[in-house]
Image (cartoon, rainbow, N blue to C red):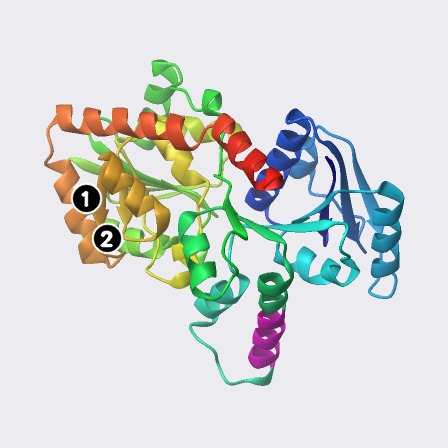
Amino acid sequence: MKILNVKVGPPADDYSAWIRKIKIANLMMNLGHEMDFVIYTGLDDFNEEIGKQINFPYEIVKVSPLNIYSKHFKKIKEGNYDIVFCNGQLTHAVLFLTKFKDVKFIMDKHGDIVKEFLLYEEGLKFRPSSIIRYLFLKTIDFLNLHFSDKITCVSHKMIEDLYNRGLTPNKAAYVTNGIDLGLFKEPESSKIQEIKDELNINNRMIFTYLGACEKWQGVDGFIEAAKKLKDHDEIAFVIVGGNKGKKDGNIRYVPKIPQNEVVNYYAISDVLVLPRPGHPAAEVAAPTKFPEYLAMGKPVLTTEVGDAAIFVRENHCGIVIKNNEPQNLIEGILELKNKDKDELEKMGINSKKLAQKEFSMEKMASDLFNALSN
């Protein structure tokens, strides 16, 4: 098939979202499809880190609200494409106006813009700017739901949500958030020891959260739990991804690190923590850190949220707590602290098996093949 893989908006947005776009584009070519990757934008800037990851030809088309439709229509007509693959909800909502019967429009959805807005706003606040933004996002959501030929989803919970909201049966397809498992291997023991020495956390059971600190990640609850346990000498907490490094009792805050250092901080850990809050925005999401946690062969402490909770429970690769209230996190931390070494080791083995089964690039390629073919 010939595919126009397209993104509307500046090429300098969220890094993790771009990584999925890049993986899907590479997989399309590996599956033998002819693909053109086009970014419609009014801006010239390009995130350098994102640029380094793109290893396929792409085209940046400068557009304005007045000419984007004519330029896109011309692109489709000249390219004689079978599929327009829309990366993200805004892309589809803008480009659906140029949809016609001979081209199939597929949208890749890895979040829910309305639910995320309500999470950050803590509900719909009755002020003009909030209401206008909400109505704008609801319009995008409506167009996505009713005018996509197919929606590829990053989680099973997202598919369930779409069908509950009235999406026509068989119009959603699961495409796992695959990772290159070969990148997540234990580093040299000397490197692990070096970091432990630097953080002064030797001879402790280490619980780590690594990632962004957006509200939907729930890291605030984990920090609060850690503070209440900061006098426990046998436990250490490592929180990676903040703005600056500091020490607070047995808590270590580590600033954002380069991508190639991530595996080292996973490796020093005994348990990796996914403390997301119980909110619809978190329920349908699938954070990339979860398969990375699993690939490192570590037990996972997660809240009862989304696919991750189901995977952890069914595969016995950690424990699931009710929500990210500090007291629940404390109970989960202490439960894992009191498990014997063999049981924790078995959880880690199960984590790695789950990563290989569910989150490999081969699995992602198979999912994408089925989504594009059916």
Asked whether, in this view, residue 193 is left or right of residue 213, the answer is left
The answer to if 357 sits in the magenta stretch is no
Which dot marks residue 233? none
Q: In whole angstroms, how far apart are the C-alphas of marks 1 and 2? A: 9 Å
Tell me if residue 26 comes above or below residue 127 in the rendering. above
Asked whether, in this view, residue 363 is left or right of residue 332, the answer is right
Element on which disc 1 rests: helix
Residue type beneath disc 1: Ile
**Cβ–Cβ below 8 Å for labels 1 and 2?**
yes
Read off the magenta span: 129-139
> Can the viewer see residue 145?
yes
The answer to if 130 sits in the magenta stretch is yes
Q: Position of residue 150 (x, y in %)?
A: 59, 51
Q: Position of residue 193 (x, y in %)?
A: 32, 20
Which dot marks residue 225? 2
Of circles 1 and 2, the one toward us is 1
Q: Which of 145 and 208 is in front in this view?
A: 145
Quadrant of residue 349 in the image? top left
Which dot marks residue 333? 1
* SS majority, magenta: helix
Q: Which of 96 and 222 is in front in this view?
A: 96
Residue at image x 15%, y 35%?
234
Asked whether, in this view, residue 295 is left or right of residue 30, the answer is left
Residue at image x 57%, y 40%?
20
Residue type beneath disc 2: Ala
Tell me if residue 250 comes above or below residue 357 in the rendering. below
